[in-house]
Every structure is written in structure tokens, then in C-alpha cells.
Amino acid sequence: MDIEEARTLYQQLYNQLQPKCPIPKNKQRGDKAGPAYLTGIVNMLIEANAGSLPVDYNPLKLATVSSGASLQHTFSRRFDGCFPNTINPIALWEIKEYYYTTTFGSRVADGIFETLLDGFELEEARSASQQHIQHLLIIDSRFTWWACGRSYLCRLIDMLHMGFVDEILFGREVVQSLPRIVLEWVASYNSR
């Protein structure tokens, strides 16, 4: 999506779902300041499909994997969200929305590197604990990815094939795919 499409979809879902979940602000100033549209869309869809189960929409601590009283792994970065929380999560996700980007710069390259690092760490954690934690990457901005960053899209697909991310959702694809994914989390949570 571009910024106008994201704004429209955000407003439609906001009106339809009447969310209680947090909707963070973007980091822009002046007339560009406002909701982080993709993050808001993701949060609303997760809330609508997770029911009353806990969701950490903004983890302010590092995710950890443990077995009994034994700590298996602590991740080196905070994720954008965890289900149900940061201790032995079922799923972790990252959101990269670059609607106001005018060039393809180091910020996007850093985002790719962070996702790769997270994937390596998740693989390590899976090996140590024998627990599979789903790793989602959710990205958007037609200009950033299709006009400027096609070579980085190839890196994302490489990460997907190497198993460093379980799924990549592009823009409005979250509307159809995220409810299915969240219902899988709920089933996993209920079978614990």
C-alpha cells in the first residue's frame, strides 16, 4: 500500500472493530504525524482474533525462552509484538512500515539486518529448547519495496527460504492472512 491506502484501510478497520488495543504513533512531525497505520492495523486484527487472551503489543523487555527454572535463551533485541508475552512466546513479530521514506537508505537495510539477526537467534533458541516460536515479518510501502528496494525483497525471500522468518506479510495481505495466523496461535495457546 501507499500512505493513502494504508490510512483508508486503517480507518475502515478502526471504525469496524472499535479497538481497545494500543495504536502507536508514527515518528513523523508536523502534518505527517499520526497513527502508525500498519502497526495499528496489525494490532487491531490481532486483538479481534485473539479474543481475551493476552497479547504484548509493545514488549518493553527482551523475549526469553526457558524450560522449567532453566533459562535457555534471551534475545538481543525487542520485538514489535509477542503472543502471549515475552516469556516462552508462541509468536514474535516485527513490523517495518516505511510510508514516508523518499529514498532507499540505511534505515531499510538496518531493518533487513535486524530481521536476519532475529532469525539466527530464533534458530538457536529452537535448537536449544526444541520449541518452535513463530517469527513473522510484516512490511509495507509500495515505493520503498517495489520502486527502490527490489534487491532487498530478494533478501527477504532468501530469509524465508532459509527458515529465518516463518511468514512475510505484505501490506493489505494482513487483512486476510493475520486472522488465520492468530487463530493458530490461539489453538497452540489453548493446547499448552
Image (tube, rainbow, N blue to C red):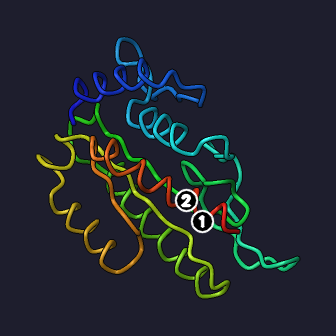
Pointer 2 with pointer 1, Cβ within 8 A: yes
Q: In which quarter of the image is the C terminus?
A: bottom right
Q: Residue at x 36, y 26 (%)?
A: 10
Residue type of the residue flagged with mark 2: Trp
The numbered dot on residue 52 is none
Secondary structure of the residue carrying numbered label 1: helix
Q: Which residue is drawn at 54% across and 25% down?
A: 19
The one of 151 and 79 positioned closer to us in this rendering? 79
Q: Residue 107 vs residue 131: left or right?
A: left
Residue 38 lies, in percent from the top left, at 38, 36
Residue 63 lies, in percent from the top left, at 67, 61
Q: Quadrant of the N terminus?
A: top left
Q: Mark 1 points at which residue?
A: 188
**How crowded is the residue under tag 2: few (<14 C-alpha within 10 Å), some, or many (20+)?**
many
Q: Name the residue under label 2.
A: 185
Residue type of the residue flagged with mark 1: Ser
Secondary structure of the residue carrying numbered label 2: helix
Q: On the image, which quarter does residue 13 sit in? A: top left
Residue 44 lies, in percent from the top left, at 49, 34
Q: On the image, which quarter does residue 42 sit in? A: top left
The one of 192 and 46 positioned closer to us in this rendering? 192
